[in-house]
Amino acid sequence: MSEQTQKDTAAGTADEAVEQNAQEQMVEEQSADTDTTAAEDISGQQPSESETAGSEVEQLKAQLEQAEASLTEQKEAVLRAHAESDNIRRRAERDVQSAHKFALESFVESLLPVIDSLEQGLAQPAESEEAKALKEGMELTLKIFLDTLSKKNVEQLDPVGESFNPELHEAMSMQENADFEANAVIAVFQKGYALNGRLVRPARVVVNKGKAPSIDQKV
């Protein structure tokens, strides 16, 4: 082979190498551009780590608020249940106490006619010795009755001289009497009774309807 031919061959080979390098570089650049574009697309489509963490925090906050609200409702329900239970217990205790306190009311009412009869008998004059002995026995019997009732917190109402009280007294009639204040009880037809402060029977009375006497009249 001639020297010129060898030069031409070497030159062709060099040109081919240059062209091949240029092509490889273009392929690499295109591949790099493709990778960059794909990464940008992925970055644009997927949220960042900070965004994901923030969303999870908001969800946890919402769940916590819901749990706290539910706990508050349950606490209030428990408190209401306790309060209602206490109210029921107190009502039951009051009912039991009232039942014990006023259990004797019907029994006391049944005794009142007997006491009334004894008092009416004692109001009658005793002329004979036999009548006097009978009267003494009646007095003793009445005293036993009243003492027994007193021990059971039964109070006898004998309001002569007191102001008329419609809650405790029943007015049977009205009369004028200068010896008493106006609206005062001047006589008792039938004594009243109360058990532990609660009226069993009102006192049946006569009420003064006259004006109260003046100081000059009293002197």
Image (spheres, rainbow, N blue to C red):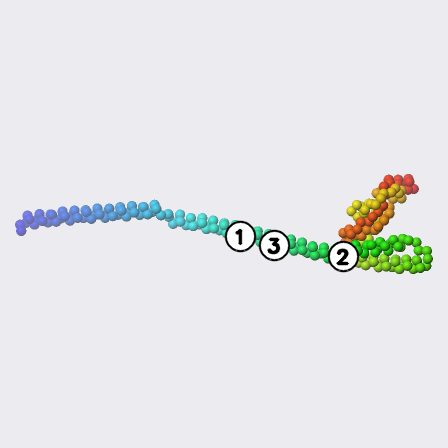
Residue 71, image x and y in percent? 53, 52
Q: CA distance from mark 1 to mark 3?
A: 16 Å
Q: CA distance from mark 2 to mark 3?
A: 34 Å
Residue in the foreground of this view, choosing between 126 and 51: 126
Q: Which mark is residue 71?
A: 1
Label 2 crowding class (10 Å Cα cut-off): few <14, some 14-19, many 20+? some
Q: Decide which of tag 1 and tag 3 comes sooner along the chain.
A: 1
Label 3 crowding class (10 Å Cα cut-off): few <14, some 14-19, many 20+? few
Residue 126, image x and y in percent? 93, 55
Taking the image as shown, residue 48 lies to the left or right of residue 209, namely left
Residue type at mark 1 is Leu
Local secondary structure at mark 2: loop
Residue type at mark 2 is Leu
Residue in the foreground of this view, choosing between 186 and 127: 127
Q: Nearer the viewer, mark 1 or mark 3?
A: 3
Q: Residue at x 87, y 53 (%)?
A: 120
Label 1 crowding class (10 Å Cα cut-off): few <14, some 14-19, many 20+? few
Residue 92, image x and y in percent? 67, 55
Residue type at mark 3 is His
Q: Which mark is residue 82?
A: 3
Q: Nearer the viewer, mark 1 or mark 2?
A: 2
